[in-house]
Image (cartoon, rainbow, N blue to C red):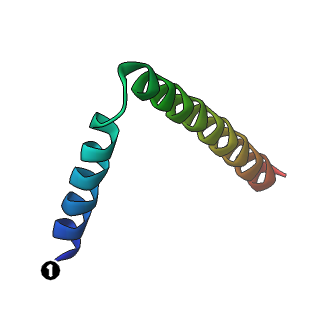
Amino acid sequence: MGHSSLMKENRDEQRNEIMKKTPGERLLAALELSDACAVFNSASRKALEEKRAAGKA
């Protein structure tokens, strides 16, 4: 089984699991993922700024 097939299978399994949840539970999961994405975005921006600053020094 190829790499993309495994990814598709995993995604389908996750989709099936989330569909078993109530709309409120799905909303909470989406909000938690959104918060995690914001944290990663902030960290990556900070790291990029530090890298750029180190290159100019």
28 horizontally vs 48: left or right: left
Q: How many marks?
A: 1
Which amino acid does the dot numbered 1 rest on? Met
Image quarter of residue 27: top left
38 horizontally vs 52: left or right: left
Task: Quarter of the image for the N terminus: give it.
Answer: bottom left
Image quarter of residue 49: top right
In this rendered view, identify the residue nearer to me: 20 or 33: 20
| Residue 31 location (% of width, % of height) | 52, 25
| Residue 56 location (% of width, % of height) | 78, 49
Q: Residues within 10 Å of mark 1 (few under 14, many from 20)?
A: few
Residue at which label 1 appears: 1
In this rendered view, identify the residue nearer to me: 36 or 46: 36
| Residue 36 location (% of width, % of height) | 59, 37
Up the image or down, 55 lies above or below 23; here it is below
Outermost residue, bottom side: 1
**Label 1 secondary element:** loop
Q: Please give the name of the residue rendered at 20% of the width and 59% of the height, measured from the top-left corner.
A: 8
Image quarter of residue 17: top left
In this rendered view, identify the residue nearer to me: 18 or 37: 18
40 horizontally vs 34: left or right: right
| Residue 45 location (% of width, % of height) | 65, 39
In this rendered view, identify the residue nearer to me: 16 or 46: 16
Up the image or down, 10 lies above or below 29; here it is below
Q: Please give the name of the residue rendered at 16% of the width and 68% of the height, measured from the top-left corner.
A: 5
Up the image or down, 25 lies above or below 52; here it is above
